[in-house]
Amino acid sequence: MELLPLNYGNKTLPLKSPPSPKITCFRTIRACSPRQDLKGRTVAVVGLGISGKAAARLALARGASVVGIDQDESLSSLEHNPSFMVLNSTGFKTVLGSFDWNLLNDADVVVVSPGVPLEKYGLSYLLQSGKKVMSELDFAAEALPKSVKILAVTGTNGKSTTVTFAGQMLNHFGIDTFVGGNLGTSLSEAAIQHVTSPAQECKLKVAVVEVSSYQMAIPCVYFRPSVSVVLNLTPDHLERHKTMLDYAEHKCRLFSHMTNAKLGLLSFGNQHLDEAVKKYWNKFNPAWIGAFPGLEIDTEAKIATFKVPDIGIESQLQLGSMRAMGKHNYYNAAVAALSVAGLDVSVHIEDINSTIEKLRPPPHRMQVVHKDIHGVTWVDDSKATNVEATYAGLMGLKGQKSVILLGGLAKVLVGQVSNGFEELIEPLTGHRCVITVREMLLLDTFRGFRSHDSSGVVR
């Protein structure tokens, strides 16, 4: 396949031609979806990971002809994937490896997966030229009923747990709720359910969505949260964002399409967030995590106090019955509770007290998997994403004898001497054993600890 160079401004973007890129021709499928708003249009989906595949399936369900594009030539073509074959569509094509840029330029809509930077494939140029370039989140939100309320949660640490807690609270009160986003199940899956179901069968009331900074790289139009939360901000993903301010600005885009009737929760006292949120300050009712108006937590008394006069909230939440480990989970639960109360779905803080002892964190996040007869607690924290998240979890194990499974990826930027793992020495002192998995290279840092790698070899 001959590749055409992309010219704009004074730059030329070279597109390399592979020996034989994998291309699969259109497959025609009978169309019968009642909500085929994209019939007769072409959607290009760039990146065929979890989000990209879901977006491609949603585009098919909406009646579009779809081209799915990914650089990874080792991927399998999706035409024969059962989850694609059952959808009603007018056509689908997979392109793996290098591709002709005109596939993007000629498409009516371009949906970009969060793992694909806008600097690639001339995506920034397409966006600036007026082409409809969308994130998977925005593409999904466009297809959801306007009646669905969105609770969006971002931040460096605690997103998955806060989203999980909020979903559990809502489900406890019988409210039909989708829980997903960056957590694992793409928002497009909820949209597919709506698009492929008869109108009268849509029971979804709330979508609780974990949002990463990468998912906010393209400004949203249809993704309009009723409640937005930025839990915290510490250095992470700087290999892509370069500066903390840019990182904060991506996070604060959650507030860009809110109105004064909506609640926005923000970590108190973070200079980067304070600067980034200024442009959206008149779009929502602000509340703070760690100050009033907002919420404060007495970790010794295990009580969260809420005061948000603008939306009529003044209450307390008893946290003493929580089974989830660690004081950081007091904050996760309290933020989840205030967010749910702010949705205006007839669930009040006082009601949420009854759910606290039932809350369970997501798997592999300070998850107690066993307590043996010797009083040793076995803990799985193999999905921590950075040192700060691991540290917060370990502080909840103080005074206990534990075997701890740790995992994650060292994120060391150019010019940095340390990966930060030395901060974990103190909270790990006194525990029975550390087991490291994946790419968490702790062995040099913890020399002298009794530790194992995931193969079972004692180090």
Image: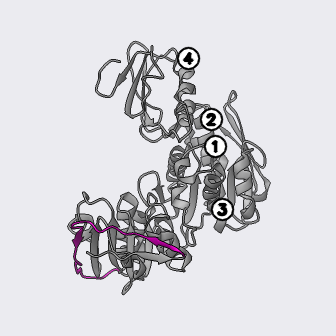
Instruction: Give how far apart the Cα atoms at labels 3 and 4 are.
Output: 41 Å
Q: Which residues are magenta?
A: 10-33
Query: Which residue is labeled 3 in the image?
Result: 255
Mark 3 / mark 1, whichever is N-terminal: 3
- Is residue 19 located in the magenta-colored stretch of the structure? yes
Q: Mark 3, mark 1: which one is toward the viewer?
A: 3
The answer to whether 182 is drawn above or below residue 400 in the figure is below
Q: Which mark sits nearer the N-terminus, 4 or 2?
A: 2
* Mark 4 / mark 1, whichever is N-terminal: 1
The quarter of the displayed image where residue 409 is located? top left
Tell me the residue at 64%/53% (across/down): 248
Neighbor class of circle 3 (other Cα within 10 Å; few <14, some 14-19, many 20+) is: many
Distance (Cα) linking label 2 and label 3: 29 Å
Q: Dominant secondary structure of the magenta stretch? A: loop
CA gap, disc 2 and disc 1: 8 Å
First in sequence, mark 2 or 3: give its number: 3
Dot 4, how many residues are within 10 Å of its Cα: few (below 14), some (14-19), or many (20+)?
Answer: few
Residue indicated by mark 4: 399
Q: Which residue is mark 1?
A: 334
**Label 2 belongs to which residue?**
319
